[in-house]
Image (cartoon, coloured by chain):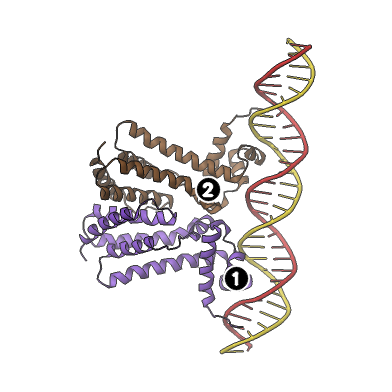
Chain colours: A purple, B brown, C yellow, D red
DNA sequence: TTGACATTACCGTCCAGACGGTACAGTAAG
DNA sequence: CTTACTGTACCGTCTGGACGGTAATGTCAA
């Protein structure tokens, strides 16, 4: 036997995302996740003692990845709004998996939204602190929220050209920011 | 006996919204809805033969209300974007119940999003047809989508002043449209 | 006017299945 | 001896939905 140490956690988290995406958020059961992860149910519950902990793990994982992606650009001296824009842009363009698991989490307990909302609140606070025209900032920020939301709902209202126009406009606004 | 005819349907729909809001989207069970609506489970299933039909009823009801609210302003010669803006504004300001039931519906079957997405697609098409600067239109539209999404998640990232600034900006953009 | 019957609009109970979680014995690697 | 599991068996609960009633209302012929 080859116990893969604690990176079973990662496998389980990824399996959960896949199950939610393929079988629908309503079919995100522990059995299904365990099977997909190639782990016994006992093993799953060894890593995540409850379903709530597992969902929390999903939320944290995604928040960490998102933050890392933003700080990456920020470290390169990019304006924060531009970093945010770029991350949204990339995840919006790539066939990135829509976070179907989020719907499971919210259905289970709307409290899972709190860390996400806090994260978004902190991000907006950092943006506000960078100065520039408030109206410009807000409309660009909210438009990006709208884009992300569209992705979450797996919709594509905008044509590629339109998305390009929108992002160009947002980038122009971001360029007006002080770094 | 006083069978309240078909307006039991309405009562059930409203009860479902309340249950989802109060007990959480994960607790939206037929029993809970029936109890809240003051109807037996059998009675509920008489009006909505399956849970899916009930959720479909919720989607349709909301889409109808939304469309009515928009057309109301449109009939007064308002630019379409302004109507849309006004509806979002009002529902965003009022302590309007966040549509927690939507999460139940999506968890049950992501297909429930389709009529909603189609509706939004039609709305955007109508907006495009009105002319005006595409970048302006898109950024205002997406910002409103973002606002609506925030409401759905029951978050309030923006202060009242900020929301005012945002809406003023959006209205300015809408004013540039031909009627 | 009245009785017969059909329809409508519900009631209340029951059930099979799924789900989260527990318990526990075993096992292989370090 | 501990860590990191596997595998199976099981439990209590909840849920959607099927089903068999039943009272009020509507219809229509005699």
CB under 8 Å between callouts 1 and 2?
no
In the image, are marks 1 and 2 on the same chain?
A: no
- Chain under callout 1: A
> In the rendered image, which residue does mark 2 sit on?
B20
Q: Position of residue A81 (x, y in %)?
A: 28, 62
* Chain that bears disc 2: B
Query: Does residue B118 lie above or below A42 as drawn?
Result: above
Q: Residue at x 51, y 69 (%)?
A: A14
Residue shown at the point (58%, 46%) measured from the top left: B52
Query: Camera-side residue: A25 or B93?
Result: A25
- Tell me the distance, in whole angstroms, between the alpha carbons under discs 1 and 2: 29 Å
Q: Secondary structure at mark 2?
A: helix
Of residues B77 and B30, which is closer to you in this image? B77
The circle drawn on residue B10 is none
Callout 2 crowding tier (Cα within 10 Å): few <14, some 14–19, many ≥20: many
| Residue D16 located left or right of residue B91 | right
Q: Indicate the secondary structure of the residue bearing disc 1.
A: helix
State the residue in front, B36 or A51. Answer: A51
Q: Residue at x 53, y 49 (%)?
A: B105
Give the residue pinned by disc 1: A45
Q: Quadrant of the C terminus of chain A?
A: bottom left
> In the image, is A138 to the left or to the right of B42?
left
- For disc 1, the neighbor class at 10 Å (few under 14, some 14 to 19, many from 20) is some
Residue B7 appears at what percent x and percent y?
56, 32
| Above-or-below relation of A162 to A81 | above
Which corner quadrant holds the N terminus of chain A? bottom right
């Amino acid at each position: 036997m080859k116990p893969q140490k604690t990176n079973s956690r990662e496998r389980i988290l990824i399996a959960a995302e896949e199950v939610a995406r393929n079988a629908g958020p309503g079919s995100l059961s522990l059995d299904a996740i365990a099977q997909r992860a190639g782990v016994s149910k006992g093993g799953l519950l060894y890593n995540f003692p409850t379903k709530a902990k597992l969902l929390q793990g999903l939320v944290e994982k995604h928040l960490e990845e998102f933050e890392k992606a933003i700080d990456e650009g920020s470290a390169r001296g990019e304006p924060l709004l531009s970093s945010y824009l770029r991350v949204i842009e990339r995840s919006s363009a790539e066939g990135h998996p829509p976070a179907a698991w989020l719907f499971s989490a919210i259905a289970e307990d709307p409290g899972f939204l709190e860390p996400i909302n806090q994260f978004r609140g902190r991000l907006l606070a950092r943006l506000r602190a960078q100065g520039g025209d408030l109206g410009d900032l807000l409309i660009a920020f909210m438009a990006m929220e709208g884009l992300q939301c569209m992705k979450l709902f797996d919709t594509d209202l905008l044509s590629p050209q339109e998305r390009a126009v929108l992002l160009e406009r947002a980038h122009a606004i971001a360029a007006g920011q002080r770094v």
